[in-house]
Amino acid sequence: MGRIEVCKELAEDPNFQAYQVAEKAGIFTEMEPGTWVAFSGGQLIATSLKKETLFKKLDEQALNELSDSGSFVDQVGVSKKISNIGKPRRIMGGE
């Protein structure tokens, strides 16, 4: 398998870093495969088997309670397909 590169902004994100720590600590192996997880403020703040339910939980929390660093959401215990979409192209239409 090839090397995976993470952009600098994501690598420095405290929520992504907390996700990586949880992953290495085996936290996700204790969860049912397909569980959605959300991190904010460098902490795991919500989980759910349904993405819609997870976002409802996040929406129910006051926005000022969420960290200034935003949040990081992922689905754990499932294989992911990563695609290289390449450079965006400008498409010019004419009338």
Image (tube, rainbow, N blue to C red):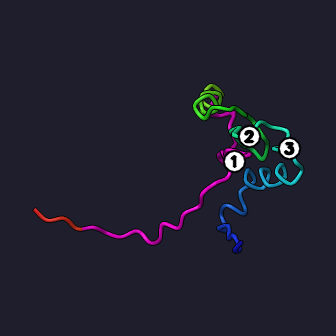
- State whether residue 71 is above or below residue 54: below
Q: Main secondary structure of the magenta part?
A: loop
What kind of residue is marked 2? Pro
Looking at the picture, which amino acid does disc 1 mark?
A: Val
- Residue sitting at x 73%, y 34%: 46
Q: Are marks 2 and 1 in contact (CB under 8 Å)?
A: yes
**Neighbours of disc 1 within 10 Å: few (<14), some (14-19), many (20+):** few
- In this picture, which residue range is highlighted in magenta? 62-91
Q: Is residue 45 magenta?
A: no
Q: Nearer the viewer, residue 3 or 93?
A: 3
Of 30 and 7, the residue lying toward us: 30
Amino acid type, residue under disc 3 in the picture:
Ile
- Residue at which label 1 appears: 78
The mark nearer the N terminus, 1 or 3, is 3
- For the residues marked 1 and 3, what is the alpha-carbon distance in whole angstroms? 14 Å
Residue receiving disc 2: 33
- Res 28 → quadrant: top right
**Discs 1/3, front:** 1
Q: Residue at x 72, y 43 (%)?
A: 40
Q: Which residue is mark 3?
A: 27
Q: x, y (%) of residue 9?
A: 65, 63
Label ID, residue 87: none
Element type at marker 2?
loop
